[in-house]
Image (spheres, rainbow, N blue to C red):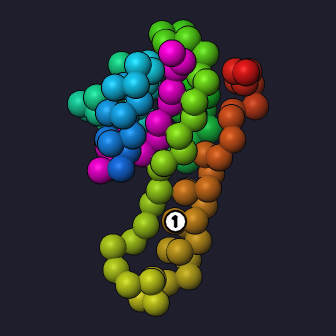
Amino acid sequence: MSTALVTGAAGALGRAIVRRLTADGHQVAALDRDAGGLGGALDLKVDLRDPAAIEQAFAETTALLGPVGILVNNAAVYPSRPFLEVPLAEERRCTRSTSAPTGWPPSTPRSR
């Protein structure tokens, strides 16, 4: 099987994705800002707002588990109150941090 990298692995959905990929035989790198006991073959504490941290996570994953063949971009930031009560500046901050990690880091080769 291939190597999978899952962002947002500390949440309920992220943990379920990690468990399923692991059960299906994949080597899983589980990434989250709150890493620890995420259930992956490799658990990494990574702030996806930091491009250097993303590069390091991909490098470490590739070095320890092999090239990443599956990317699950599950990380999200969202306020815990009704949408209409969220100030525009906070909504934009959440949108930026949620969409920032899309795609592969430029210096990381894609697996095919």
Judging from the image, what secondary structure is the residue with disc 1 in? Answer: helix
Question: x and y percent of residue 37 in the render?
Answer: 24, 30
Residue 3: in magenta span: yes
Residue occupying the far left of the picture: 37
- List the single residue furthest toward the bottom: 84
The one nearer the camera, 53 or 75, is 75
Q: Is residue 32 magenta?
A: no
Picture layout, residue 44 above or below residue 11: above
Q: Which of 49 and 74 is in front in this view?
A: 74
Question: In the picture, residue 34 is in which quadrant?
Answer: top left
Query: Which residue was labeled with disc 1?
Result: 94
The stretch of residues the image draws in magenta is: 1-12
Identified by mark 1, the residue type is Cys
| Left or right for 46, reference 12 | right
Q: What quarter of the picture does the C terminus occupy?
A: top right
| The image quarter in which residue 39 lies | top left
Q: Residue at x 45, y 83 (%)?
A: 83
- Say which residue appears at 47% left-offset and 36% top-offset: 6
Relative to 13, is 5 on the left or the right? right
Q: In this view, does 95 lie to the left or right of 111?
A: left
Q: Which residue lies furthest to the front in this view?
A: 24
**Residue drawn at 75 percent across, 31 percent down:** 106
Q: Where is residue 80 in the image (x, y as percent from the top left)?
A: 33, 73
What residue is rendered at 61% in x and 45% in y? 101
Count of labels shown?
1
In this rendering, position of residue 65 left or right of residue 42: right
Crowd tier of the residue under label 1, counting other residues whose Cα lies within 10 Å: few below 14, some 14–19, many 20 or above: some
